[in-house]
Amino acid sequence: MLPSALCSAAPKPTIIVFLSDDHGMLDSTPYGSSDVRTPHMQRLADAGMTFTHAFIASASCAPSRAAMLAGLMAARNGAEANHTFKRDDVASLPEVMRKLGYETAAFVLSLQRSAEDEEKQEQWAGLHGVMGSGSAV
């Protein structure tokens, strides 16, 4: 018989993904910025991990986000043109994480979003809710 300490599952890690448009590597403290201070991001990075060898899947924002969230290049997830969404039959990272017992959320700043865009974003991302600011909120 195994001791109960060996049988209990390790706690799930907290995962935070910062995804922003036009955010270069030197635009935040964890990656070496000396003129842009991001102390909260630095504290999170110090307690967790950062990625230094990442690349974007597309020069356009929507296809790049869709590729990151779906794990598939734009040609395979359906979001090839900018301002488009992945196909409904393609799973997203938030959907998979929810199946693993995680809570998921998104905080969005967008000044040009319609109510229809907000609903579609929530559906394709598999989120419980999208919190943001802009014309639809």
Image (cartoon, grey):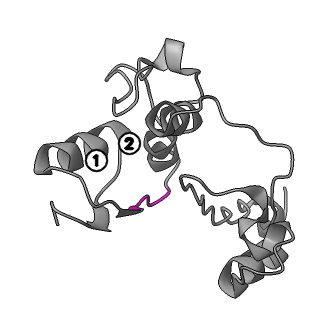
The quadrant the C terminus occupies is bottom left
Q: Secondary structure at mark 2?
A: helix
Residue 42 drawn in magenta? no
Residue drawn at 78 percent across, 76 percent down? 29
Residue drawn at 84 percent across, 55 percent down? 1
Location of residue 106 in the rendering, given as x and y in whole percent from the top left corner: 40, 60
24 with respect to 82 (left or right): right
Location of residue 25 in the rendering, given as x and y in whole percent from the top left corner: 77, 58
Query: Which residue position holds label 1?
Result: 122
Q: Secondary structure at mark 1?
A: helix
Residue 87 to residue 15: above or below: above
Location of residue 135 in the rendering, given as x and y in whole percent from the top left corner: 16, 62
Residue type, label 2 = Ala
Q: Which residues are magenta?
A: 102-106
Residue drawn at 22 percent across, 52 percent down? 113
Residue type, label 1 = Glu
81 with respect to 119 (left or right): right
Most prominent secondary structure in the magenta stretch? Answer: loop
The answer to whether the residue labelled 2 contacts the one labelled 1, judged by CB atoms less than 8 Å apart, is yes
Question: For this rendering, which residue is in front, 118 or 93?
Answer: 118
Query: Which residue position holds label 2?
Result: 125
Q: Which mark is residue 96?
A: none
Residue 5 to residue 63: above or below: below
